[in-house]
Amino acid sequence: MPKMKKELPNKKAIARSKEKKKEHPTEKEQLHPRNRHRARYEFKLLKISLPELAPFVKLNIHQDESIDFADPAAVKMLNRALLKQYYHILNWDIPEGYLCPPIPGRADYIHHIADLLGTSNFGTIPQGSAIRCLDLGIGANCVYPIIGVREYGWSFVGSDIDAVALESANRIIAENPVLTGKVECRLQPNAKVFFKGIIQADEYFDLSICNPPFHASAEAAEQATLRKLSNLQHQEVTEVVKNFGGQNQELWCEGGEETFVREMVRQSKQFATSCFWFSSLISKQSHLKYVYEALTKAGAVEVKTIPMGQGNKTSRVVAWTFLTKDQQAAWKTLRWGAKSAVVDKDDW
């Protein structure tokens, strides 16, 4: 009697079973309630808003419309569509190789920091162009000011050490009337200085924001990119293709995020009465201990830690102020009550 071959499972059938349409939650509940991107990307709507996105949209293994997030061109086109659909930005582009940030995460920072201003203003978020925000490291993409201007009407000053990045940001501002006159870019010639030369005499900001370079070396940044690409493509990737881009100064600095933020804290003390709330993203939980130590040493009067989450990633914003309760009360009256553009230190 001939031997019967053992019937093996059909690999294609198994693959097809795994590729059935996946059930997704209706909202990304970890994002801020006012974040416009809590729902899944509506690619049909985005393709209507920006037809150039259409060639990049394909069905994924779950039979959902998506893009290849490992493809830098696809990621940039998605950003263009999101910014046009939700923030009325008609012309947006960045030079090749520069950071192309995920819009939902950037929006979360703006909404959370707006809530912080609100808690300092009897529950009402101060809005309008009299509210001024300093974006340390505006980058070529200008995304934080775009969201802050469109959502709350704030005005921005964006600093950067990269003249090419500022040229790109200025081009975005000039080509979009909704931003013109509301965002100003300033070059910081010294990469080790944060506020000096940017904040002018008798100039006041209601908040400052920063997305610091995370990695401590170019090698660490490259390894992290390889891990991310391997996860996206479900196979080992050995060649770096930065799907979200990023120049060296955007991705890494000596000492990494921890050292960067600690130095920012130290220097912020010199401008204690020029800004109500200083803030920075902190990507790694273990860095908080050292940031808190720096804040204690600098004499911060009040410190807030705001948790954030995007997908499987968790991060947080740390905010601090050097203003006493009396100074905070004067600030609320002079800037948020009367919407005055100038604060007299004699009232403090």
Image (cartoon, rainbow, N blue to C red):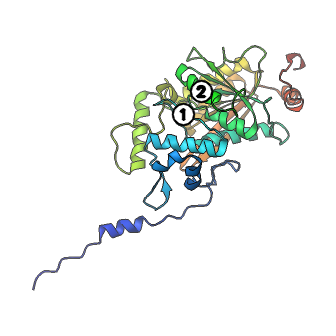
Query: Which residue in the protein does label 2 denote?
Result: 171
Along the horizontal axis of the image, is 288 left or right of 336?
left
Other-residue count near label 2 (Cα within 10 Å), few / some / many at <14 / 14–19 / ≥20: some
Quadrant of the snapshot with the N terminus: bottom left
Question: Considering depth in this image, is 67 or 106 the residue closer to the camera?
Answer: 67
Q: Where is residue 48 in the image (x, y as percent from the top left)?
A: 58, 51
Q: Quadrant of residue 333?
A: top right
Disc 2 to disc 1, C-alpha distance: 9 Å
Task: Tell me if I can see residue 137 in this picture.
Answer: no
Other-residue count near label 1 (Cα within 10 Å), few / some / many at <14 / 14–19 / ≥20: some
* Secondary structure found at label 2: helix
Q: Where is residue 118 in the image (x, y as percent from the top left)?
A: 79, 39
Task: Tell me if I can see residue 51 in this picture.
Answer: yes
Q: Do the residues labelled 2 and 1 touch (CB within 8 Å)?
A: yes
Question: Considering depth in this image, is 40 or 309 the residue closer to the camera?
Answer: 40
Along the horizontal axis of the image, is 18 left or right of 116?
left
**What amino acid is found at the position of numbered circle 1 in the picture?**
Asp
Quadrant of the snapshot with the C terminus: top right
Question: Considering depth in this image, is 48 or 287 the residue closer to the camera?
Answer: 48
**What amino acid is found at the position of numbered circle 2 in the picture?**
Arg
Q: Quadrant of residue 314?
A: top right
Along the horizontal axis of the image, is 194 left or right of 133?
left
Q: Position of residue 168 (x, y in %)?
A: 56, 26
Query: Which residue in the protein does label 1 denote?
Result: 93
